[in-house]
Amino acid sequence: MLIVSCSHGKHLGPLIAKKSNIRHSNLHVDKFPDNELRVRFDTNLKNKNAVLVQSFYENISDCIIEAILAAKTAEELGAKKIILAAPYFPYMRQDKRFHKGEAVSQVIITGLIDKYFNAVHLMDPHLHRKNKLENIFKIKPKKLTANNLIAGYIRKHVKNPVIIGPDEESYKWAKNVAEIINSESIILNKKRYSSYHVKIKLNKKISLKNKNAVIVDDIISTGHTILETAKILKKLGAKKIYCICVHGIFVSNALSKLKKAKINVISTNTIPNKAAKIDVSGVIAGSLKN
Ligand code: R5P
């Protein structure tokens, strides 16, 4: 087996390789003057199982094209099996036609991965209406989770925590993390009006006096879900507000907005960012062993 870091996998590829004791190499990626991508392997792939590590953030479209160019090339160079290890995999939230005429992008993008890879290992994919990776991919999928690491972080750093899930979809993270640390959890209701406009509601009366509220979610993108949730938690008397996510995308200065609202933000390192304090490389390394 060989681990190859693609352009957006370099922050994790070497750590995964070290922890799994598998040889590591970088994919060389550059661009022609007109922005076309050029990828090149500088290692022998013949008869090897090649694990391509790529996290799909920032220029997501380039990340996808790069992974496909690399996978097809690995096959041509004789790789036995080509596995995608994606710390963050995109397009999972677009799992239905929300508006007339709209693409169901999840199906289209995962279809591309099916065509060029033999297996996928995804860290905390956003599963909602289709709640199993097996119902989405035709190739062999593995769903990995950072929930144990998040639970460990809370246990070590937060006294008297109450775990908050900001919307119905977040229970897979919030409720599960609360169960691991044996604490109370509350799942709120969210209505999304647009990318930057959400409303959060709490259906029952509770008090968070003397408690530290820890919002747990899979993704923070614009941060508005968390900002709105925090307003409610403050009114309920929470001592401190923490927010822990798996994938810190943090667009439009989200991280500064959250800090300004006095929210302690922590994320894993599936996407490199200033709040990334939880390392998921061990989970990915473990998944490659069995
Ligand atoms: C969606 O349901 C996800 O779990 C997140 O809650 C959502 O993507 C967060 O988006 P934003 O930070 O833009 O509110």
Image: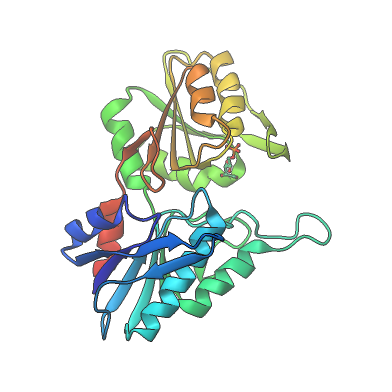
- The image shows residue 281, relative to residue 70, as above or below, that is above
Q: How many callouts does the rendering have?
A: 0
Task: Determine whether, in the image, residue 119 is placed left or right of residue 78.
Answer: right
Ligand 1 shows up in the quarter that is top right
Q: Position of residue 288 (x, y in %)?
A: 28, 67
Toward the viewer: 181 or 257? 257
Q: Residue furthest right?
A: 100
Front residue (pair 4, 134): 4
Q: How is the image coloured?
A: rainbow
Q: Position of residue 229 (x, y in %)?
A: 58, 27
Judge whether residue 290 can be spotted in this image: no
The residue positioned farthest toward the front in the image shown: 33
**Residue at image location 73% in from the left, 63% down from the top:** 103
Q: Is residue 238 visible?
A: yes
Residue in the image at 65% along x and 60% along y: 95
Q: In this picture, is 232 found above or below 82?
A: above
Q: Residue furthest left?
A: 21
Q: Is residue 62 left or right of residue 23?
A: right
Q: Residue at x 54, y 16 (%)?
A: 234
The quarter of the rendered structure image containing the N terminus is: bottom left
Taking the spot 60% from the left edge, 39% from the top edge, the residue there is 167
- The x, y position of residue 219, in whole percent, is 51, 43
Q: Please, is residue 264 above or below residue 49 in the view?
A: above
**Residue 42 is drawn in which quadrant?**
bottom left
| Residue 73: % across, % down | 40, 79
Q: Is residue 4 left or right of residue 242?
A: left
Quadrant that contains the C terminus: bottom left
